[in-house]
Amino acid sequence: MTRVVLLGASPGPDTSPTGLRLAALPGNPTVAERLRGQLASYDPRPATIAGGDVAAALRALAEVAESATESLLIIPENSVIHDELIYQITKTKRGALALVAKEPRPDSTDEEAQEDLAEAESELVPIEEADPEIGLNRLEGLPVRARVGKSRVVSVGTATHAVTRPNSVLLGPLHVSVRNAPVLAETCRDLAALAHTFGPDDDLVQLVVFGLVRNGVSVGIRGRRDLFYRRVTTQEEVNEAGPEMAAMDEDRARLNNAVKGADGFFTTYFVSTYSRFIARWAARRGLTPNQVTLISIALGVAAAACFATGDRPWMVLGGVLIYFAFVFDCVDGQVARYARKFGVLGAWLDATFDRFKEYVVFAGLALGYVIAGNGEDIWILALAALGLQSVRHLLDFSFGAANRRKPPAKLPTLALDAPDDRELRAALTRRREERSHGLRGVLKMWTRAGRFRAVHWARKMIVFPIGERFAAIAITAALFDARITFLTLVIWGSVAAAYSLTGRLMRSLV
């Protein structure tokens, strides 16, 4: 569950959305009614904090955060938003996440605008030497007073707190994990004591993120991408927002989000290009993720049976079946994410029977090799492949469990009453320089190398993920024999184990 906090109008031009109706949507709901209906499955009784008095609103938010036993979703009540965007924000694994919009750059096709931009950028001093400023530009009715990097908010300003080269606005939705709830409560109380220093156009969400960042909380960022979000204050804005939101394909965004973004090369290009459509078809016909998992298991066992014959036509069929066993192994997770049907049993089945399919296929390959009269020494290779894969899985799970217990790295802090972010940026620079030496430097360099597509996919493939393993089994079994299959698994698996173990040891020492 998620604790939902609805914010009333912040200081400034925003007004209550009461009575503003989304005529373009079925039922002609008001903005507030629709938002509450969207959030009912997360929190049937959301906390509501009235706007107007900043100090009172901050103290009320502090009380909610202090009593929270689950993560918090803080969102302005005049928000028009897609359901899928709410879902994606609340499912983040980050300690805090804010929805942001960056100041747009001139259209790349406009040569005159590009020349003006190049001229303006040439006159800018490096950001390390830039002076903090009070952001006066506005974007979607909000003051541009946040500086964001590639993955998180670097610093935030207010009407009286300068920020170095602001480039973004904080649109509204803010997700804070339960582990950061105590920091949020303390931050809001401290901010309430400074309420007299804020300006009439300072947004409440902006102020909260301002405090969190200065108190050392890493606030991640995400954009709207192909989903819709807008704050509305007038019926004219509502009339524009309704059709614009309805024109966007939310289902496609939901379907794309059902596919893991960190899959391997084989899965990305030879499975996920179409498996998502199988997942949508299955979900719309009521198939559960567990039922799809059973289909994957059945295909894996059938492949093993084909391999056990030792005959070439059956070996080719086995290769085809093991490929589709993996396809449905991907589909079950995609169905779960698309239909939002998650369960402990499903997670256990998926993790357990992935291993079962591999090992029963190993047995089938070895048995077929013996039946074909090629000798029983194949069992040694089969056991070597099974043992190596078992050790790798053990290391994967144990490292993951240990890593989850590792506290997040602390970021520099800055007093809330500091007039600008110079000290914070200087501390971040020192931190970056300290982390660029020794093992941290090597890891950072290797991470940066991932910007090149060839390196990115090479790193994905070298760890020999399940997609590559099933592809190796399917291809070598269909074209060659079990000995080649097991040699491929043992050699590639050994390289993958050495690579993974080296990286994990390095990460454990920094």
Image (spheres, rainbow, N blue to C red):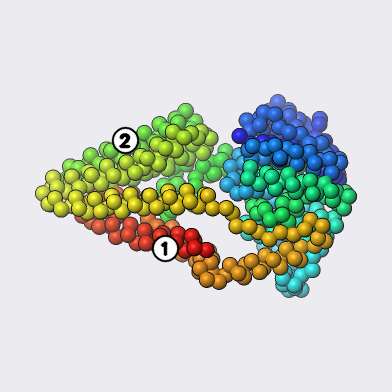
Whether residue 66 sits left or right of residue 142 in the image: it is: left
- For badge 2, the amino acid type reads Ala
Q: Residue at x 77, y 58 (%)?
A: 415
- For badge 1, the amino acid type reads Thr
Front in this rendered view, residue 510 or 228: 510
Q: Residue at x 51, y 42 (%)?
A: 258
Which residue lies under the disc numbered 1? 502
**Does label 2 or label 1 sit earlier along the sequence?**
2
| Comparing labels 2 and 1, the label whose residue is closer to the camera | 1
> Could you say where residue 343 lies in the image, as x and y percent from the top left?
48, 34
> Could you say where residue 300 lies in the image, as x and y percent from the top left?
31, 40
Q: Is residue 353 above or below residue 27?
A: below
Quadrant of the image containing the N terminus: top right
Residue 135 position by quadrant: bottom right
Counting labels gives 2
Front in this rendered view, residue 328 or 153: 153
- Which numbered marker is on residue 298? 2
Q: Residues within 10 Å of mark 2 (few under 14, many from 20)?
A: some
Residue 414 position by quadrant: bottom right
Q: Secondary structure at mark 2?
A: helix
> Could you say where residue 24 lies in the image, as x and y percent from the top left?
71, 33
